Amino acid sequence: MAEKRAQFGTKIGVLMATVGSAVGLGNIWRFPYECGNGGGAAFLVVYIAFVFLLGVPAICAEFSLGRSSRKGMPLSFRVTDGSRRWDILGYASIIAAFMILAFYAVVAGWTLEYIMDSVTGLFKDTPNSDRHAQFASFVSGWRAVGWALLFLLINALVMTGGVVKGIERVSNILTPLLFLLLIVFSVNSLLMPGAAQGLEFMFKPDFSKLTTEVVLGALGQAFFSLSLGMGCLVTYSSYFSDDTPLVKTAMQISVLDTLVAVMAGVIIFPAVFSFGMSPAEGPTLVFEVLPNIFHNMPGGSFWSFLFFVLLALASLTSIISVSEIVVAFLCDCFGMTRIKATCIVTGISLVTATLCSLSFGSLAELNLFNIFDFLSSNVLLPLGGMGLCVFVGWRMKRSAYLEQMKRESGVPAFVFDYITIGIRFVAPACILTVFIAGLL
Ligand code: PHE
C-alpha cells in the first residue's frame, strides 16, 4: 500500500462528510420534482417510511463492512470473504461511480452558470416567457460543457487535499453553511402568499394519489439520496476511527438528509403556488421555475445567488464522495498516490461529462446522459445495494457486523434486531422491487 490509511480526525468531521455525501442534488433538485410528480404529501410519507425501514439498516451494513475491512471497493468484499467471488459487486460500483460522476457534473455545472446569471442579473432581465427557450439553448451548447469541466477540476483540487485535510475540512465548512442558508430560504418562502397552499400540498396526504409508480419513485429516491448501494459509505467508513458510533451516525445521516429534502420542498412548493406554477414540472423544476420566481421576487438576484451557491456546494460534497470510491480503489488496488488516482479519475470524467453535456445538443441521438442516469440509478445502484445487504446479512458473520455496531453505548437492544432484519430481509426485498421495476 502506498500510504497509511487515513482516518477522519473528529466525530463531527465524520458526520459532516457523510451528511455532505448524502445531501446534494438528490435532495434539492431531485426530491422536489419527484415529490411534485408523486402528488406531494403521499409521496413524502412513503419516502420517509423507506428511509427508515430500508435506509438505516442498509447504511449500517455498508458501515460495518467498511470499518471491519478498512477497505473500499472491491477489496472490502475480498478481505472479508477471503475470496474474489464478490469482486463483481465492487467493479459494478466503480462503473456506477464513473457514470454518476459524468451526469452529476453536468447538472452541477448548470448551478455554476446560474450563479453567474444571478450576478449578471440575467434572471431579472429575461421575461418569464423566454425562460424555457433560454435554458434549452444554454444546456445544448459548449458553455454548459465548460461549466461541467470546471466543476470536475474544482472537485479534483479538493480530492488531492486528501481525506482529512481535503474532504473533512471542506465538509466542515460547507455542510453547516448549507443548513443555515436552507433555514433562511424556508423562512423566506413561508412568508409568500402561496405558503398555505404549498404546505398543504407537502404535508396533507391524499393517499388516492399513491400508484405503484409513486411508491417505486419514493424508494428509488431514498436510495439515491442516501448515497446507498455503490459502496460510497463502505469507503467512507473505512476511514472511521474504531469508536465512531455507526448506528447513531446512520440515524443522524437519515434524519438530516430527510430534513434537507423536506426543507427543499418547503422552499420550493410555497413559491411554486405563489406564482401559479405547476409542482409537477419534472426535472426542470429547479432550473426553470426558480429563476421565474426569483425574477418576480424583490431582491431576486441576491436570493438566486445564495440558492445556487448552496446547490453548487451541496453538489460538490456529494461528487467528492463519488470520486472517493474510485480514488480509494486505485490507491488500494494499484498502490497509486492520491494525486495520480485523482488525475486519472478526473481525466476520464472530463471526457464522459463532455459527452453527457452534449447529449442536450449535438449528441442528442446518443443521449449518454439518459443512458448513464438510467444504468446507474435504476440498474447498478439497486443491484449493488442488494448485493451489499445480502453479503453483510448472509455472508459476513452475524457476530462480526453486530460487533461493529455494538461498540457504542446507549442504543436499545431492539434497535439491533430492527437493523438485522432490515439488512437480511427488508432491504434486499425492497431493493429487488426497485431493480425489477427499473428494468420494466
Ligand atoms: N446522495 C447524493 C445526492 O443526493 C448523490 C450520491 C449518490 C452520492 C450515490 C454518492 C453516491 O445528491
Image (spheres, rainbow, N blue to C red):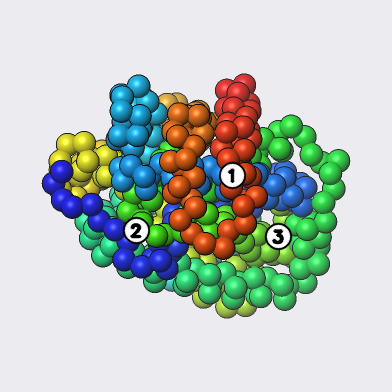
- Find numbered disc 2 in the image and state the secondary structure of the residue it sits on: loop
How many residues crowd around disc 2 within 10 Å: few (fewer than 14), some, or many (20 or more)?
some
Mark 2 to mark 3 CA distance (whole Å): 41 Å
Residue assigned mark 3:
269
- Amino acid type, label 2: Ser
Mark 3 to mark 1 CA distance (whole Å): 34 Å
Q: Which mark is residue 241?
A: 2
Q: Residue at x 70, y 60 (%)?
A: 269
Give the answer, above or below, for where 410 lies relative to 301. Answer: above
Q: Residue at x 32, y 53 (%)?
A: 239
Quadrant in the picture for residue 437: top right
Q: Position of residue 327 (x, y in %)?
A: 26, 45
Placement of the N terminus among the 4 image quadrants: top left
Residue assigned mark 1:
419
Q: Position of residue 213 (x, y in %)?
A: 71, 33
Q: Earlier in the sequence, mark 1 or mark 2?
A: 2
